[in-house]
Amino acid sequence: MQPATVKHKDMINQRAIKKNRHWRMTAGIALVILFYACAHVVTPTGGPRDEDPPEVVRSTPPNFSANFDGNEIRIFFNEFVELHNIRQQLLVSPPLETMPEVRIRGRSIVMDIEEELNPNTTYNFFFGDAIRDITEGNAIPNFQFVLSTGEHVDSLSLGGQVLNAYNLVPEEGVFVMLYDNIYDSVPYLERPVYLAKTDEYGFFDISNMADGEYLMFALDDQNYNFKYDLPDERIGFLDSLVRPQYVEQPPDTIPGEQEEPTGEGEDAMVLQAVTETPDEESAEPFGTMHSGPFHTLYLFQEADTVQRVTSSDLTHKGLITIVFRIPFDSAYVREIREPFEDDAWHIPEFGVDRDTLRIWFADTGRDSLFLEVRDGDQVLDTVKRATVPRRSARDRDENDEEVYLDISRGFRRPSAVPFHQPLQLHSEHPIQETDSSRIELLIHDSIPMPASFSFTDHVRRTIEMHPPLEEETAYRLKILPGAFKDIFGLTNDTLGYAITTTSRENYGNIILDVEAPPATNQRILQLLNMDEDVLQKKLIQDSGRYVFRYVRPGRYLVRLVDDLDESGAWTTGDYLQQRQPEPVHMLPDTIQVRENWDVEIPWFITPR
């Protein structure tokens, strides 16, 4: 037998072995778990999105510095940046003949000026939102860099807004230009001394100006040469000269110790910061942040006065269509090779916009016509046109089908016909003869209703029925063959139309209580759809209550035009004649019209 002490030692050793084995097993399991945990890679959540724009930390030369005589400007930022549409957004005032070249170098941008700057001149380099960080695309809004080639930096400013003269909508991306040479043709011949560009709200701001009086223009510059030299460019101008004023500016630097960058300076941090951007939470739209003089310009396109014929074609047999460049006053034609005894050989038809003249003619006994085209006393062109269109071999080989005169309805299906408007039909060609006995109007599909028809135009193509239809009623219109005969001898085929009229409950009424300053000229009160098409209009002069009746449900605009020339329509401006476009006033809000509902709106109009 073994002694007790030996047995006790054996038991202790066995327990120690078991304990060590247990810890080894536990450690192994922990290692396996740790291995798999490390092998399973989880994408880091990162942090909140960076919404801060880059900050300027230093520039060479400093912003708003004087006595600049170099040709390079370098601006350092607190992070890497990129340039977005720099050619479109960079604006230099006064304008340079050659735009500076701007490039990225590390955490800075370098601007190379490729021409000699004018002496004693303050230059403003406006970057818009072209400078952005490369990670999130956050832009420095309305960033400007100012320097002077003289002893001081000019500190006067002014601003304003550019509106569309026809609808008062703010104009974005329009140049506002100031000239110190004051004569009528200056916007045609010279580049401005100060320049700005309107933002999305139409606002502009011109700062760091020298004292003086200036001519102010707005220009929708199509070729970016800062001159009013294209016929499709729009212009706006002020009747009087403008003068900038001093506006207190925020401090441009925060005092601090500067650290010069070493080498290229890409990673160098500078302690001095330039406060170029306003607080985003409190910033107003650009152009409203200054307290200097505020000017409003109305942008318009001058009426084109150069008239000519742009095209003339034989549209089909018996119709020559002549298109003019601008609306005509009194267009007409005459045969000059073998003149007709009178004008009965043709029927002239004027387009709605008076820029198209249609010449309808039946058999003239001639293969071609030599026409002199006139607008008033001005001879515009001489055109030669065949009287019969050419036919292809295929057309000559095929048997001609019987052709009928096309009479179309002046209403859309399946929409109900407005009961308050006369029923209209439209003929493809001018009508020569009518037989009313072959036209029948039935009410409730069976009861004959007496009706008469007349032409509303001298061409005899628009046919109108009398008396007006009743509301919410079903009709059937029957037109038998031979009811209409055109100038070519064609007659209509059998036609039948089912008609249902609307009721008063399908419409709303707009009641306007207009309070306007007294005027000696007439005014035009217009109801517009959202595409600004004129739906109804009234010629008024004084304040009063005016009603637009039978308005379909939808949203509408209202405009008041000061019809100074009493032409019955809005007249645009003319710069050389120093004539502003006729003033317009827009009801501030759109009008929502509902069925069987009256909308009553007070409108107080202030002088412009």
Image (spheres, grey):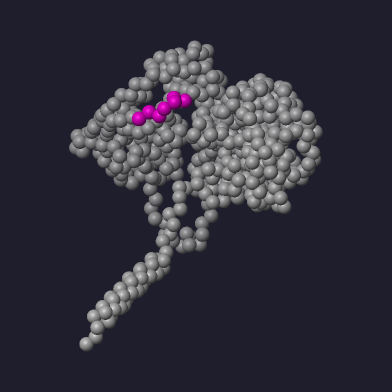
Which part of the image, by quadrant, shows the N terminus?
Answer: bottom left
* Residue 328 in the image, given as x and y percentages of width and height: 58, 32
Residue 543 appears in the picture as rendered = yes
Question: Picture quarter containing residue 235?
Answer: top right
Q: Nearer the viewer, residue 284 or 303?
A: 284
Image check: 120 left or right of 267?
A: right
Q: Tell me: 488 left or right of 580.
A: left
Please name the residue shown 46% across and 15% down the image.
Answer: 516
Query: Which quadrant, please, contains the C terminus?
Result: top right
Bounds of the magenta segment: 586-592
Residue nearest the observer in this picture, 458 or 90: 90
Percent position of residue 357, x then y: 54, 38
Q: Nearer the viewer, residue 555 or 468?
A: 555
Residue at position x 59%, y 42% in the image: 55
- Examine the structure image and report whether residue 99 is included in the region drawn in magenta: no
Q: Is residue 46 shown above or below 531?
A: below
Depth check, front residue: 137 or 27: 27
| Residue 175: quadrant of the picture | top right
Quarter assignment of residue 91: top right
Q: Let me know if residue 384 appears in the view.
A: no
Residue 29, above or below 119: below
Image coords of residue 9 (percent x, y): 29, 79
Position of residue 45 relative to residue 413, above or below, is below
Residue at 28% x, 30% y: name it.
595
Question: Furthest residue to the bottom?
Answer: 1
